[in-house]
Image (cartoon, rainbow, N blue to C red):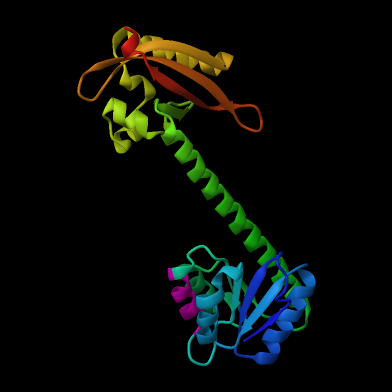
Amino acid sequence: MSEHDPSADEGVGILLVDDDPAFVEAAATFVGRHLSGTRTYTAGSPADAREFMASRGDDVDCVVSDYDMRHESGVDFLRDLREAFPNLPFILFTGKSADEVAGEAFRAGATDYLKKEMGTEQFEVLARRIDLSVTAARVACEAARNRRLLDAAFDAVGDPFYAFDTEGRFLRWNDALVAQTGYSDEEVAEMHPTEFFEGADRERVAAAIDAVVDDGEATVEASVRTKRGDRRPYKFTGSLVVDEAGDPFAVCGVGRDRSDRD
């Protein structure tokens, strides 16, 4: 086991796994040249790589592994790795052709496959693949974190929050909507927004949705028919959400219970 630039606090941490000592050291050197600030670590076997990941897995942003090694394959290592690191980028870098190993690797959870070639140019290609894989993983991680933050914020709101597309398919809703209407998450997912209302209330809500799409926002008062059959009066506000091109794609808003005001 060896490492290059262990003092670097920024950049990308890469673990290269290969039982050819000269090749793995060359890979670490050349990849480090092509990716600024990179921390590269090398392991001569999957066993060594497992030991490293067990103690320093948080330092690794991407694993690059050979396929055909003495005691086990890189895909065997990948299967074990996925139990503890399900989202860590993993690139299979091997002399075997895609027909031989790529399908097996992707089924096991590999992020990318790259065939070894002659010369040092291959390490520039590998560096680009690492950069792309790590960037994509970080974007996905940030998106998941933001989604968890939004979910927590929505559920902290005591009033029903909702978002549905222009066809009336619910995209998001919070726990308050479920608790106050009595419908389960599964039931809400299959409902149209107007199905929470009856008679004249349904017509007013439908008109308000059209007004949001046409004018950008609207407010309406209507009584929700709960799953138990009770009627609860609410004041609903809705705002239009548009995409990058300015086209409408969703309506979001909140409903405030007005029972104590009637």
- Residue 256 spot, x, y in % from top left: 40, 18
* Residue range highlighted in magenta: 73-83
Note whether 173 is above or below 34 in the view shown.
above
- Residue 235 spot, x, y in % from top left: 41, 14
Which quarter of the figure has residue 141?
bottom right
Note whether 64 is above or below 133 in the view shown.
below
Which quarter of the figure has residue 191?
top left
Q: Which residue appears farthest toward the left when viewing the image? A: 228
Look at the magenta stretch and give its main secondary structure.
helix
Depth order, front residue of 26/38? 38
- Residue 87 spot, x, y in % from top left: 51, 62
Note whether 231 is above or below 43 in the view shown.
above
- Residue found 56% across the figure and 15% down from its top: 214
**Which of the image's four quarters has the C terminus?**
top left
- Residue found 76% across the figure and 72% down from its top: 124
Q: Is residue 169 magenta?
A: no
* Total marks in image: 0
Q: Is residue 77 magenta?
A: yes
Q: Is residue 19 left or right of residue 183?
A: right
- Residue 160 spot, x, y in % from top left: 39, 26
- Residue found 64% across the figure and 91% down from its top: 20
Note whether 185 is above or below 247 in the view shown.
below
The answer, for residue 206, to whether it is visible in the render is yes
**Which of the image's four quarters has the N terminus?**
bottom right
The answer, for residue 117, to whether it is visible in the render is no
